[in-house]
């Protein structure tokens, strides 16, 4: 299995690296800066398996962006589903930095 993820928030699309031969327990350790317009928006995360000709969907999860935007951030597991059945879990870690963050801000790693 060569999994990767696509994260969509409004018009923003983020893609992880493909973890070749990573099996069913890949670790990406990638960081994405999401420009949050409205915390009531949904985020969609899809896990795919890269094949030679196309990618197969492993599963997906949809949740409110507000889950990632709490004052203490988030460190939680989300169930991914495929056709209404559990297809595993994905671990998301977030840090919330409101707009008035100082210009010397440096993002922290997410998705450990």
Image (tube, rainbow, N blue to C red):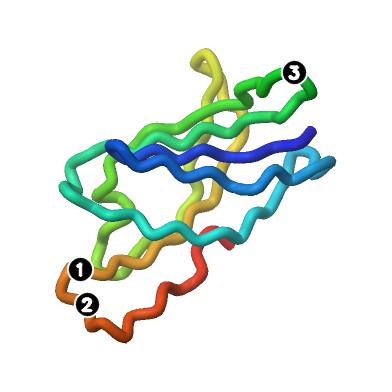
Residue 7 lies, in percent from the top left, at 45, 40
Residue at mark 3 = 53
What residue is drawn where x is 66% and y is 21%?
56
Image quarter of the C terminus: bottom right
Residue 34 lies, in percent from the top left, at 34, 54
The reply to whether the C-beta atoms of the residues labelled 2 and 1 are less than 8 Å apart is yes
Looking at the image, is mark 3 or mark 2 earlier in the sequence?
3
What residue is drawn where x is 22% and y is 39%?
41
Residue 65 lies, in percent from the top left, at 28, 46
The residues tagged by marks 3 and 2 sit, at their Cα atoms, a distance apart of 43 Å
The residues tagged by marks 3 and 1 sit, at their Cα atoms, a distance apart of 41 Å
* Residue 85 placement, left or right of 97: right
| Rendered image: mark on residue 101 | 2
The reply to whether the C-beta atoms of the residues labelled 3 and 1 are less than 8 Å apart is no
What residue is drawn where x is 53% and y is 43%?
15
On screen, residue 52 above or below 5: above
Residue at mark 1 = 98
Residue 85 lies, in percent from the top left, at 55, 19
On screen, residue 23 above or below 57: below
Image quarter of the N terminus: top right
The residues tagged by marks 2 and 1 sit, at their Cα atoms, a distance apart of 6 Å
Q: Residues within 10 Å of mark 2 (few under 14, many from 20)?
A: few
């Amino acid at each position: 299995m060569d999994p990767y993820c696509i994260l969509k928030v409004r018009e923003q699309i983020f893609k992880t690296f493909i973890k070749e031969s990573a099996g069913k327990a890949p670790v990406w350790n990638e960081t994405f800066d999401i420009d949050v317009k409205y915390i009531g928006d949904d985020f969609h995360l899809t896990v795919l398996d890269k094949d030679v000709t196309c990618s197969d969907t492993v599963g997906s999860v949809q949740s409110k962006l507000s889950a990632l935007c709490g004052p203490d951030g988030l460190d939680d597991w989300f169930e991914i589903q495929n056709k209404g059945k559990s297809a595993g879990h994905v671990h998301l870690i977030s840090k919330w930095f409101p707009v008035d963050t100082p210009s010397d801000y440096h993002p922290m790693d997410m998705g450990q």
